[in-house]
């Protein structure tokens, strides 16, 4: 669902880590998408999985320290033993903060996970998809990820016995059960893995239009599971008839071939697989899309599938033997062992976009896979099928927002701290414009940071404040910009684009607020929390300072903003949206 | 076999299977070719079934075994190769299985099983060697030597390979490197074989190709013997 009022995808992606996600924020959401929600019956066009998180936002953390070393072999246990679980946990916290644009992990997780169970976390039931295909050397999601997510859920109040890992098709119990315990805090705190649908109420037939004879776990179909967490390993995937029919990958969406299955055979979901040999006759993987719109996955209120993670610490590149451009079946397909070290985790709320980006940014990028590429047909067919991941859900290739970062260059959180934080302005005599730097905060937000810097050159009023201007992010108003001498317009505009909603008008403080910190506010505004967003957190401040020092994303963000005349339009839309939301709400 | 030799990569364009299969459709089946015909369907071997005699260019059918017998014939007993034992069921519930159709194999390797269309039996065995070495052995009965060759040729594509393992010509076996070991592709008679071997990192983190190639040679030799 592309809109003609948005800048191109490339303009945003090229801004690297800091720029895109926050800059767009919720601002650019079309009203229909903003308000469209499933009535609990699965996907409806335009629905938001989480009203506080843009479906299009996907976070990728690249950190080689998540592995202590290259695993000595491809055995699942050996592989897991090479994972630095504490680093993974820490990175997942930061990724959640980036995804939810919150300054603390607790705030982030409580934004991502929502319970519809009368608000009772203790009664909330959680299912976590894993992957039991293959054998002891098959690449599958690492224990550390499940452990962290379970720890998060338990901290929210979920009972360990109400969390279950499952694969309704292949038996994953042997791979995970030894590392699961209801009480041992060093393990995955959850119930034992559900073998097929045993731990999820057994199978229940579902009716699909694209195929027949399919069942799914009854507790998912009947809505007895409140939260579904989808964790997939990062793997290339050939497909029936050597057709590379699934976008040449098996990630979060294809992972549900182990949620929906051909229950009668006790085997893999043959009926879900697409027949066809690819090329000109490449068929649309209709079942893949249908099950990912199904109420078992996207039904519920709140929506059941709330978090999608791709474990790309180690990936299956799909490369043919010897790097051949053609072959019948690469050894690293979904049942095979990992063959490349990619050192990444990917997180989002909306599986189609998570998959689209993970495939393009990891599996199909040989600079990420250590020079490995799938065969020519895989690349060709990915070019046909992957865009369907978007169009089938009403999105265009200009929509996805990929924010990739390394731990030493974490994008500044664009949470709504409102202008309060802002110090600057007034006191800021010139150079301090450094303030500007901090401002950069906006980084993402696009808060004016960058411009502010400029101000630096102009001691006194201008510069410093300028930052504020940007800050104003919220654009709430340009007001801010005006205030801020230096930063002026640039700031204002920018801010606007980034700061969603801005109603909160951080702007207010803009004048005084040195910085982009304020800008932040904007975003929060977009999330409707501006009001309370006052006072940037220490985290925000710290990051701001860090950002200022490094200057990295700051200037980029600024440039991007400058090249984004749509900002004002978007901000205006957001302001209106915000008002509408409050009015409706 | 030194490292330098092993690292001598060649780019090979393969077109070998066809040669040995040419004319197979018109030639009488080979040897003991019981039943081969019913499974044929590839470029060659369609007439492999039965028949007397057998010209030299004819496809040769493998022995006819049942599913269990096939698995027992080709699986490795513990320490059959010194230091190698089958992974325990607790570690790997799929440590040993024999599949009889593509649909059956889908349960292990997903839709990609279709790439092995034409096999009669497919044995998968996961072995643990001297720590941390592992080897996943795949042995598939393609009914005739021609079909096994065709499968091998289709799999090797046009890649670049480290070919010198135990003296096998690249028309019989190819070896590719992975991050922690090697993958071996081979065919003997009616068998198509894959070995996925990992755990061959040297202390300095480099790949110990000599050790990996040596182990691969042992596996191939043993499997070749089993075909007799």
Image: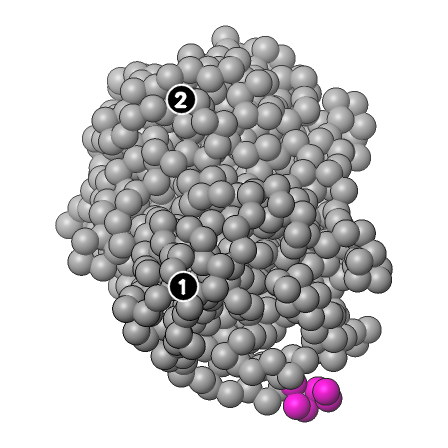
The residue lying toward the viewer, choosing from B184 and A15, is B184
Q: Residue A215 bears which disc, if any?
A: 2
Within 10 Å of the Cα at label 2, are there few (<14), some (14-19), or many (20+) other Cα atoms?
Answer: many
Q: Quadrant of the C terminus of chain B?
A: bottom right
Residue drawn at the location 46% of the way across and 35% of the way down: A268
Q: Residue A125: which quarter of the image?
A: top right
Residue that appears at 29% across and 26% down:
A212
Establish if B143 lies above or below A2. below
Q: Chain of mark 1?
A: B
In this view, the residue farthest toward the top is A118
Horizontal side of residue A568 vs B102, given as left or right: left
Residue A214, quarter of picture:
top left
Q: Position of residue A213 (x, y in %)?
A: 34, 24
Q: Quadrant for the N terminus of chain B, please.
A: bottom right
Task: Point out residue A238 in the picture as x, y percentages from the top left corner.
Answer: 40, 54
Point out which mark residue B78 bears.
none
Q: CA distance from mark 1 to mark 2?
A: 51 Å
What residue did someone put label 1 on? B52
Residue drawn at point x = 62 percent, y = 13 percent: A122
Part of the protein shown in magenta: B1-6
| Extreme residue in the left direction | A4
Q: Residue at x 54, y 31 (%)?
A: A167
Secondary element at image label 2: strand
Mark 2 falls within which chain?
A
Q: Are marks 1 and 2 in contact (CB under 8 Å)?
A: no
Tell whether position B2 is magenta.
yes
What is the basis of the colouring in this image?
A: one colour
Q: How far across and down, in percent of the image, does residue A105 sit? A: 61, 37
- Which secondary structure lies at badge 1? loop
Type of secondary structure dominating the magenta stretch: helix
Q: How many marks?
A: 2
């Amino acid at each position: 669902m592309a809109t003609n009022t948005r800048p191109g995808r490339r303009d945003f992606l090229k801004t690297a880590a800091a720029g895109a996600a926050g800059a767009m924020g919720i601002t650019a959401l079309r009203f229909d998408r903003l308000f469209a929600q499933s009535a609990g019956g699965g996907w409806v066009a335009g629905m938001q999985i989480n009203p506080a998180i843009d479906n299009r936002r996907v976070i990728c953390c690249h950190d080689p320290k998540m592995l202590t070393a290259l695993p000595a072999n491809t055995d699942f246990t050996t592989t897991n033993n090479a994972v630095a679980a504490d680093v993974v946990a820490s990175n997942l916290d930061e990724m959640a903060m980036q995804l939810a644009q919150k300054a603390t992990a607790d705030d982030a997780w409580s934004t991502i996970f929502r319970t519809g169970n009368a608000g009772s976390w203790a009664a909330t039931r959680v299912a976590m998809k894993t992957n039991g295909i293959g054998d002891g050397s098959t690449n599958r999601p690492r224990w550390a990820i499940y452990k962290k997510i379970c720890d998060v859920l338990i901290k929210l109040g979920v009972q360990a016995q109400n969390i279950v890992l499952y694969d309704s098709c292949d038996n994953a119990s042997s791979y995970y059960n030894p590392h699961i315990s209801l009480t041992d805090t060093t393990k995955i705190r959850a119930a034992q893995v559900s073998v097929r649908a045993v731990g999820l109420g057994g199978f229940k037939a579902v009716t699909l239009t694209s195929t027949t004879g399919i069942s799914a776990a009854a507790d998912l179909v009947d809505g007895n599971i409140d939260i579904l967490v989808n964790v997939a390993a990062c793997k290339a995937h050939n497909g029936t008839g050597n057709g590379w029919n699934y976008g040449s990958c098996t990630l979060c969406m294809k992972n549900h071939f182990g949620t929906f299955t051909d229950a009668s055979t006790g085997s893999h979901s043959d009926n879900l697989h697409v027949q066809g040999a690819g090329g000109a006759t490449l068929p649309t993987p209709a079942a893949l899309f249908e099950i990912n719109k199904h109420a078992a996955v996207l039904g519920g209120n709140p929506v059941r599938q709330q978090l999608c993670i791709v474990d790309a610490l180690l990936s299956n590149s799909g490369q043919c033997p010897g790097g051949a451009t053609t072959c019948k079946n690469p050894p690293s397909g979904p049942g095979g062992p990992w063959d490349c070290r990619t050192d990444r985790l990917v997180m989002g709320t909306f599986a189609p976009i998570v998959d689209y980006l993970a495939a393009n940014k990891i599996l199909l990028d040989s600079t990420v896979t250590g020079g490995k590429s799938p065969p020519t047909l895989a690349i060709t067919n990915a070019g046909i099928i992957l865009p369907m991941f978007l169009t089938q859900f009403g999105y265009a290739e200009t929509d996805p927002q990929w924010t990739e970062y390394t731990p030493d260059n974490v994008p500044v959180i664009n949470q709504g701290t409102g202008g309060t934080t802002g110090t600057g302005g007034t006191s800021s005599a010139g150079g301090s414009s450094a303030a500007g730097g901090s401002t950069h905060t906006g980084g993402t937000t696009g808060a004016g940071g960058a411009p502010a810097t400029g101000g630096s050159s102009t001691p006194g009023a201008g510069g410093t404040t300028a930052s504020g201007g940007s800050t104003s992010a919220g654009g709430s108003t340009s007001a801010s910009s005006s205030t801020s001498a230096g930063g002026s317009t640039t700031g204002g505009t920018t801010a606007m684009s980034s700061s969603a909603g801005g109603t909160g008008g951080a702007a207010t403080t803009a004048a005084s607020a040195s910085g982009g910190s304020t800008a932040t506010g904007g975003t929060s505004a977009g999330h409707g929390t501006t009001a309370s967003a006052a006072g940037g957190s220490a985290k925000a401040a710290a990051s701001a300072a860090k950002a200022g020092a490094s200057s990295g994303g700051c200037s980029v963000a600024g440039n991007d903003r400058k090249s984004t005349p749509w900002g004002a339009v978007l901000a205006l839309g957001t302001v209106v949206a915000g008002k509408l939301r409050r009015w409706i709400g | 076999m030194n490292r330098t030799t092993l690292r001598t990569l060649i780019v090979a364009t393969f077109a070998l299977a066809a040669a040995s299969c040419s004319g197979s459709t018109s030639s009488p089946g080979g040897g003991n070719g019981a039943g081969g015909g019913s499974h044929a369907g590839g470029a060659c071997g369609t007439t492999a079934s039965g028949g007397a005699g057998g010209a030299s260019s004819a496809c040769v059918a493998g022995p006819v075994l049942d599913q269990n017998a096939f698995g027992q014939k080709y699986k490795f007993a513990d320490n059959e190769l010194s230091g190698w034992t089958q992974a325990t069921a607790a570690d790997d519930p799929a440590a040993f299985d024999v599949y009889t159709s593509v649909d059956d194999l889908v349960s292990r390797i997903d839709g990609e099983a279709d790439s092995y269309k034409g096999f009669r039996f497919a044995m998968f065995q996961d072995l643990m060697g001297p720590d941390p070495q592992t080897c996943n052995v795949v042995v598939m009965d393609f009914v005739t030597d021609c079909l096994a060759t065709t499968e091998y040729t289709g799999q090797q594509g046009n890649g670049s390979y480290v070919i010198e393992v135990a003296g096998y010509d690249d028309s019989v076996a190819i070896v590719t490197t992975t991050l922690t070991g090697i993958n071996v592709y081979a065919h003997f008679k009616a068998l198509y074989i894959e070995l996925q071997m990992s755990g061959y990192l040297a202390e300095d983190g480099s790949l110990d190709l000599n050790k990996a190639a040596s182990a691969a040679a042992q596996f191939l030799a043993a499997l070749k013997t089993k075909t007799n």
